[in-house]
Amino acid sequence: MQSAIVYRWSGTVPGREVASKQLMNDTNAYCDKSVADGVITDYAWYLSGQGGIHLLIVRGEMEQLSAMASSPEMLVLNTRAGLINSDLSWGYYATGDSVVALADLFYDTAAQLT
């Protein structure tokens, strides 16, 4: 199933800006290696210059994303991100053709309730 992990945060905790830049560098290195190893398809940062919500989107197959998210390296990156960034949250999302399959499952299930 084509999926994505979407990370969302509202900014950096004051005084942790240098740590934030290092975290971004370390995250890029980990994601670049994951792309090269075929673990993920790609990733992209979406940073707001107006002080809004920031995003990191990592795309790939659900099974591989789940394995990546539970790896020791990613657990450390996620823990650091939670300590450095305000309001950090993340979750799994369907993408690509998986959206149609997930929507069909939702509508079929909902139809059984009526």
Image (cartoon, helix red, strand yellow):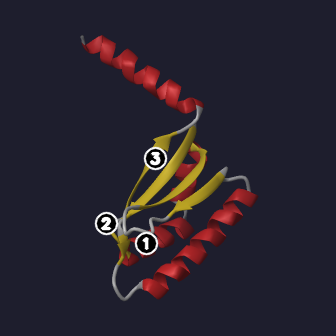
Q: Can residue 94 be seen in this view?
A: yes
Percent of width and height locating residue 19: 47, 84
- Numbered disc 1: secondary structure: helix
Residue occupying the far right of the picture? 36
Q: Mark 3 points at which residue?
A: 92
Compare marks 2 and 3 and give the one earlier in the sequence.
Answer: 2
Residue 40 seen in this snapshot: no
Mark 2 neighbour class, 10 Å CA radius: few under 14, some 14 to 19, many 20 or more: some
Circle 1 crowding by C-alpha within 10 Å: few under 14, some 14–19, many from 20: many
The residue that label 2 is drawn on is 87
* 1 and 2 marks in contact (CB < 8 Å): no
Which mark, by number, is residue 81? 1
Which badge, 1 or 2, comes first in the chain's sequence?
A: 1
- Which residue is painted at 70% across and 57% down in the image? 35
- Percent across and percent down for residue 4 are 53, 47
* Amino acid bearing label 2: Asp
Query: Residue 101's x, y, as percent?
Result: 51, 25
